[in-house]
Amino acid sequence: MSFRPDSKLVSDVAASPNFEPRVGGRRPDMLLLHYTGMQSSLAALARLRDSGEPRVSSHYFVDEDGTIIQLVAETERAWHAGLSSWAGETDINSCSIGIEIVNPGHDFGYPDFPPHQIGSVAALCKDIVARHDIRADRVLAHSDVAPGRKQDPGEKFPWERLHLLGVGHWTQASPVARGPLLDVGAVGEDVSTLQIELSAYGYGVSVTGSYDPATRDVVAAFQRHFRQAKVDGVADASTRSTLANLLATRPLPAPAT
């Protein structure tokens, strides 16, 4: 079982049996980044190709030295997102391409991502985004679409560098400073406004006016991606200002044809 790689950047194909057709023949319009979260590269690659339950996979695998391996053809639905949502969509696997980046993750020390690896990730992302015309604000973290359940690729992932290389939506985070904040237990109009703005960007959060644990998880996911200096799930002025700037600068959807 093999296939021709979709990207010229691929060094090898190591086909995974864990895929199926995209539901409704959906074309991918989202790029989702993960870390492997396992102690070794070999163990992670084996897991993504293991037909035992639970079955998981991704389209691409980027090793620590920058080597890019393709596991699933882009035309197919890989199993990388799990229970997730974004902008009202819940079948993220059908609308996305997934990249697994080798890093042991928070459970195993969470080291920095090597520069060569990030260079390869950026080049691969640019290639995928260009070929599929993926909007910048739909280049996302696993934690963005599954807050409370996932942390990857985490607050050490250099989203700003990716943006400078032409990938993803970004705004300079507002500085962390003393001031008013919203935390679990808060209620009222300010909480509703925060929830509305997070939902408007795409996060799966209910507008209840109550700062519950689910809202805290979404805020922490937002911070891991866009306000990495402090990830605590507390909506301080820096978090809210950064979110407002992102909403003001996000790309406009393409006009309907």
Image: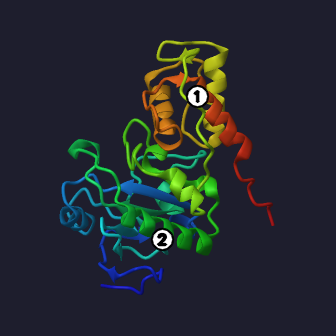
**Along the viewing direction, whichever of 130 and 156 lies nearer the viewer:** 156
Q: Amino acid at mark 2?
A: Leu
Helix, strand or loop for disc 2: helix
**What label does residue 121 carry, if any?**
none
Instruction: Indicate the quadrant where residue 107 lies.
Output: top left
Q: Residue at x 43, y 23 (%)?
A: 213
| 191 relative to 203, above or below | above
Q: Position of residue 195 (x, y in %)?
A: 60, 28
In the displayed structure, 213 sits above or below 151; it is: above
Q: Residues within 10 Å of mark 2 (few under 14, many from 20)?
A: many
* Residue 239 visible at all: yes
Residue drawn at point x = 48 percent, y = 12 percent: 185
Q: Is residue 128 found left or right of 244 in the rendered image? A: left
Question: Residue beneath label 1, please?
Answer: 238
x then y, percent, for residue 135: 64, 60
The residue closer to the viewer here, 44 or 18, is 44
The amino acid type of the residue labelled 1 equals: Ser
Which residue is rendered at x = 44% and y = 57% of the image? Answer: 33
Q: Is residue 231 above or below residue 257?
A: above
- 107 lies above or below 43: above
Query: Disc 2 designates what residue?
Result: 124
**If the image is split into quadrants, where does the C terminus sit?**
bottom right
**Cα distance between the residues tagged 2 and 1:** 31 Å
Q: Earlier in the sequence, mark 2 or mark 1?
A: 2
Residue 91 can be seen in this image: no
| Figure quadrant of residue 35 | bottom left
Count all numbered tags in the image, as a single digit. Answer: 2
Q: Where the N terminus falls, by quadrant?
A: bottom left
Q: Residue at x 51, y 61 (%)?
A: 96
Mark 1 surroundings: few (<14), some (14-19) or many (≥20) residues within 10 A? many
